[in-house]
Image (cartoon, rainbow, N blue to C red):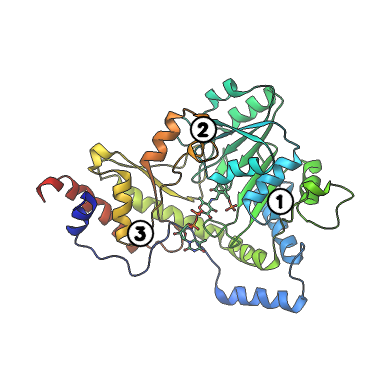
């Protein structure tokens, strides 16, 4: 019997009837959506920046307090379009502790990612290591705002302006977060959000590009639709990346409920925090650097020695009980197939990729679910202390 099998065989609880996904999966009431869809069918206008996309862009612009909010098909495309619009060349510095899409967007644009480590005591780019990576062919920094937290925006803006480089943000996970009382969205040259189903504001699938720069906004809009703009932008720079009316309908209804989603997440976070803080070897990651978080993710780190089993063993035990926890991000992007040959040494990123675990949060994570997940983790700790004796 493996250690995991042995521990599982001594845990008294039953698996959940339905798997508990990692989150967020907030969706509007079906009847409201039905009404929105009926409107789309009656208007017979389904795509190409119709009235719902236009309304959504207006509301998001106000909500985030930015000059331009431009909806696109998803954040990965949003990052690609942002890079094209800023006319980036050569290399772009970014953290490796991120979803692969951050680096993927650069490769699609023919740019070369240069990976920077994250802070020793955090999950965001280590701004003290940035300047050593800046060479003549670096045209931009792409910082990533993770887990409902934010990178050190002040330090990043100082460094980018000192070196005359573009600064943009993969804020895929940061919708609604506030940095020093200001909504994330207007920092750097451009910020890109994800409106995927697993994000706190969802369009099902979708993305959002924000900027306060009129000229950049114009370019972004020209690149987004694939047709009718060829006089302005070269054909090879144009990407069909529009959001449909049906997606905008979901996002508009979700935006109305956003505050409830945020509060619900915060309550779930507090419950986990209370329970998990009593379990040796488990530390919950607080949203970093923000004055208001969306609590997009519930991340904790596992200290194998104190907890009694490894992060991966705990993941497998949770899976046995139908809890679909995730080890985002494993491996760090620098260790994925495209980059492993460059031999990057990023010890803090490597540590996080081996120690952290993401637990369910969001629409499907009621109080009972949180309590049961915490029971499984607590019992795992207790049983793993005696595994040799079991
Ligand atoms: N930058 C960062 C920092 C990001 O985190 C992301 C995306 C991006 C850029 C790119 O944004 P997009 O281009 O996606 O807009 C998921 C999401 O697909 C992805 O959006 C997210 N970050 C990433 C962290 O997680 P997967 O491949 O791990 O997700 P998946 O499909 O396995 O879903 C997660 C869990 O949720 C599963 O248990 C299944 C469940 N689920 C998922 C969906 C979509 C449901 O139960 N229902 C659903 O509708 O990437």
Q: Residue at x 56, y 68 (%)?
A: 28
The residue mark sitting in front, 3 or 2, is: 2
Seen in the image, is 135 located left or right of residue 95?
Answer: right
Above or below residue 73? Residue 50 is below
Q: Position of residue 354 (x, y in %)?
A: 37, 39
Identify the secondary structure beneath mark 1: strand
The residue mark sitting in front, 1 or 3, is: 3
Q: Residue at x 62, y 50 (%)?
A: 75
Mark seen at residue 341: 2
Q: Is mark 1 within 8 Å of ligand 1?
A: no
Q: Position of residue 303 (x, y in %)?
A: 29, 38
- Pick whichever of labels 3 and 2 is earlier in the sequence: 3
Q: Is mark 3 within 8 Å of ligand 1?
A: no
Query: Can you see residue 114?
Result: yes
- Pick whichever of labels 2 and 1 is earlier in the sequence: 1
- Pick whichever of labels 1 and 3 is earlier in the sequence: 1
| Gap in angstroms between the C-alphas marked 2 and 1 | 38 Å
The answer to whether mark 2 and mark 1 are in CB contact below 8 A is no
The residue closer to the viewer here, 2 or 239, is 2
Q: In the rendered image, which quarter is residue 285 located in?
A: top left
| Gap in angstroms between the C-alphas marked 3 and 2 | 34 Å
Q: In the rendered image, which quarter is residue 372 located in?
A: bottom left
Residue on which the image places disc 1: 69
Q: Position of residue 179 (x, y in %)?
A: 57, 39
Mark seen at residue 323: 3
Question: How many numbered circles does the render carry?
Answer: 3
**Alpha-carbon neighbours of circle 1 within 10 Å: few (<14), some, or many (≥20)?**
many
The answer to whether mark 1 and mark 3 are in CB contact below 8 A is no
Q: Is mark 2 within 8 Å of ligand 1?
A: no
Q: Position of residue 93 (x, y in %)?
A: 61, 31
């Amino acid at each position: 019997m493996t250690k995991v099998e042995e521990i599982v065989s001594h845990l008294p609880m039953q698996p959940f009837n339905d798997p508990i996904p990692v989150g967020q999966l907030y969706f509007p009431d079906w009847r409201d959506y039905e009404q929105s869809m009926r409107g789309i069918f009656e208007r017979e206008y389904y795509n190409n920046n119709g009235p719902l996309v236009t309304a959504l862009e207006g509301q998001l612009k106000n909500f985030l307090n930015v000059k331009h909010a431009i909806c696109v098909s998803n954040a990965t495309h949003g990052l690609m379009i942002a890079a094209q619009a800023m006319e980036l060349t050569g290399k772009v510095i970014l953290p490796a502790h991120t979803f692969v899409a951050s680096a993927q967007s650069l490769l699609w644009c023919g740019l070369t990612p240069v990976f920077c480590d994250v802070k020793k005591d955090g999950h965001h780019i280590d701004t003290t290591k940035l300047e050593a990576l800046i060479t003549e062919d670096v045209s931009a920094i792409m910082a990533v705002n993770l887990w409902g937290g934010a990178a050190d925006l002040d330090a990043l803006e100082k460094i980018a302006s000192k070196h005359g480089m573009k600064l943009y943000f993969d804020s895929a996970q940061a919708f609604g977060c506030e940095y020093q009382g200001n909504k994330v969205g207007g920092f750097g040259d451009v910020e890109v959000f994800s409106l995927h189903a697993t994000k706190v504001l969802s369009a099902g699938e979708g993305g959002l590009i924000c900027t306060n720069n009129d000229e950049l906004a114009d370019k972004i809009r020209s690149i987004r639709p694939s047709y009718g703009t060829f006089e302005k932008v070269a054909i090879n720079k144009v990407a069909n990346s529009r959001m449909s009316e049906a997606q905008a309908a979901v996002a508009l209804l979700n935006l109305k409920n956003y505050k409830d989603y945020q509060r619900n997440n915060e309550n779930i976070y507090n419950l986990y925090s209370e329970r998990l803080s009593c379990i040796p070897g488990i530390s919950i990651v607080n949203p970093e650097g923000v004055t208001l978080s969306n609590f997009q993710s519930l991340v904790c780190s596992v200290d194998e020695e104190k907890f009694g089993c490894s992060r991966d063993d705990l993941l497998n035990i949770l899976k046995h009980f139908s809890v679909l926890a995730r080890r985002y991000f494993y491996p760090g992007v620098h260790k994925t197939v495209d980059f492993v040959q460059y031999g990057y040494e990023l010890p803090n990123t490597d540590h996080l990729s081996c120690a952290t675990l993401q637990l369910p949060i969001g629409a499907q994570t009621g109080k009972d679910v949180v309590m049961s997940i915490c029971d499984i983790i607590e019992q795992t700790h207790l049983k793993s202390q005696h595994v040799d004796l079991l």
